[in-house]
Image (spheres, grey):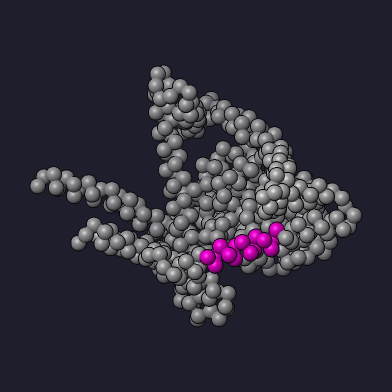
Amino acid sequence: MSDDASFTKIKYVTILLFLGAILLPKVVPLGLPVAISDKTRETFTYMESIEEGSIILINWDVCPGGELPIGYPLVDLITHGMEKNLKFVAFGTVQPATGPLGQEVFMKWVDWGDYKYGEDYVYIGFLPGLETAMAAVATDFKGIVKEDIFGSSIDKLPLLQQIDDYKDLGAVILATDWSHMPAAYSRQWDKEGLLTIAIAHSGLLPDLLPYYPTAINAIMLGTSSAAEYEYLLGKPGKAIVATDVLSSAQIMIIIFGIGSNILPLLSQSKKGEN
Amino acid sequence: MVSMDPGIWVTALLSLFIISFVYRDNIFFRFALYTSVGAGMGHFAAVSINTINQLGLQTLLKGDLRFVLGLVFGLSLLSRISYKYSWLSKYGNAVLFGISAGVMGGKAVKTMIIDQIILTILPLNGVPLLTMVSNIISVVAAVTSLSYFLFTIGNKGSLKTSQNIGRLFLIFAVGASLAGRWSWAINATHSLIDLIFKTWLGIL
């Protein structure tokens, strides 16, 4: 068999094994243990400390594909916040595609129960302008926000009437998978006394840590943080299954990593002996 | 039960077309790719036009003149369409660059320089042993990694050891970042599997 054919065969086997590792925990839940990290406990404590009825602003800037690791922790934080009657407003500034994706997560994934749209939660959608838009939202909210994603004017949305600038907020949640966002966010939203929680996937940790705990007070990383948070909330949910999937697929990647590096070495040493 | 929602069918089929690239480049993959680019551009244009209308034109019509200059400079960017008048766009660009630099520059000094220097001044007394070790590692990592970027000196002389240690820390950081991105890829695949098997086909 030629090297190319052999490589193609290995590629397909690898893909099938990888897909199997993701599918297996969905069919047979593995129930792998979840250890609650200090960072998740810290986020939980911060959420507990927010004054009842406060408004939480969510900056949702997530690419397609990132909705799971960022969406699950966000849903958990909102679920927790609803126990304290917190209000939620969400927007994005990086690219227009984040608008509909955020809408799906914010409007459909969260069980809003008795909450009323416009009074208790609002989804603004995409605001063009990147960092200048972020700066404007922090300092002149009504100057840049004119309507929500459905085209309703802010005059008809009582919740938005209560916001003039960052001083009217109880906390800000930065939900992102863009590596430049932690720096941009820290530049525009590092405000005295304003609680900031970042939600990202674990690959963004090196980008977030330089701003922790000065500009960013708490960090939630992907589905594993969401699973830990679900335990703290006492409401185990989808994130725990997603963490099983993550663990199973990561074990497979470790096996691939070790196998693909050690097997060629072994075959080389065998050739050497012959 | 298989979903009857046409939106789910379109999403699932386009997702399958895209992942068909794993097999090889094919017409379905290209169709999905061009559709995605086209839809993205269309959405971007619609959002931009709506924003100009809401923030610019509607505000002007209400008698608020704050956005006149913004609109004029914004229009000047469109002059690039014409070779003869493209020089007008430099004024719009100058405003964009100036404002961006102003919005970012001043605040960057505090958050990206001063705060981060403060974060490397870590206590060694009165903290648990593990925290002390962690603090020492953090400071050593920050200093040696920075020394790696002193290109004027190069990898020689008294800084060579520090730069080599710094390079190790940088490798660890890249490794951690790469592992994190794998997690992102796993989650994205998980999302796709959920879409196909659960939302579309109703199997899982």
Relative to residue B88, is residue B127 drawn left or right?
left
When the figure is inspected, residue B140 is found, relative to residue B174, above or below; the finding is above
Residue range (magenta): B34-48
Tell me where residue B202 appears, x and y as whole percent.
49, 77
When the figure is inspected, residue B161 is found, relative to residue A165, above or below; the finding is above
Relative to residue A233, is residue B162 drawn left or right?
left
**Picture quadrant of residue B43:** bottom right
Query: Which residue sits at x=68%, y=57%?
Result: A126
Any part of residue B156 in sight: yes
- Of all residues, the one furthest to the left in this rendering is A274
Number of marks in the rendered image: 0
Query: Which residue sits at x=84%, y=48%?
Result: B66
The kind of secondary structure the magenta stretch mainly shows is helix
When the figure is inspected, residue A203 is found, relative to residue B40, above or below; the finding is above
Relative to residue B178, is residue A130 drawn left or right?
right
Query: Which residue sits at x=60%, y=46%?
Result: A181
When the figure is inspected, residue A23 is found, relative to residue A226, above or below; the finding is below
- Work out whether residue A7 or residue A235 is closer to the camera in this orientation and state it: A7
B37 magenta-colored: yes
Tell me where residue B160 appears, x and y as whole percent.
40, 23
B57 magenta-colored: no
- Of all residues, the one furthest to the front in this rendering is B84
Tell me where residue B122 appears, x and y as whole percent.
55, 28
Tell me where residue A171 appears, x and y as whole percent.
70, 48
- Work out whether residue A177 or residue B51 is closer to the camera in this orientation and state it: B51
- Work out whether residue A67 or residue B19 is closer to the camera in this orientation and state it: B19
Any part of residue A193 in sight: no
Relative to residue B179, is residue A8 drawn left or right?
left
Query: Which residue sits at x=49%, y=69%?
Result: B31
- Of all residues, the one furthest to the right in this rendering is B63
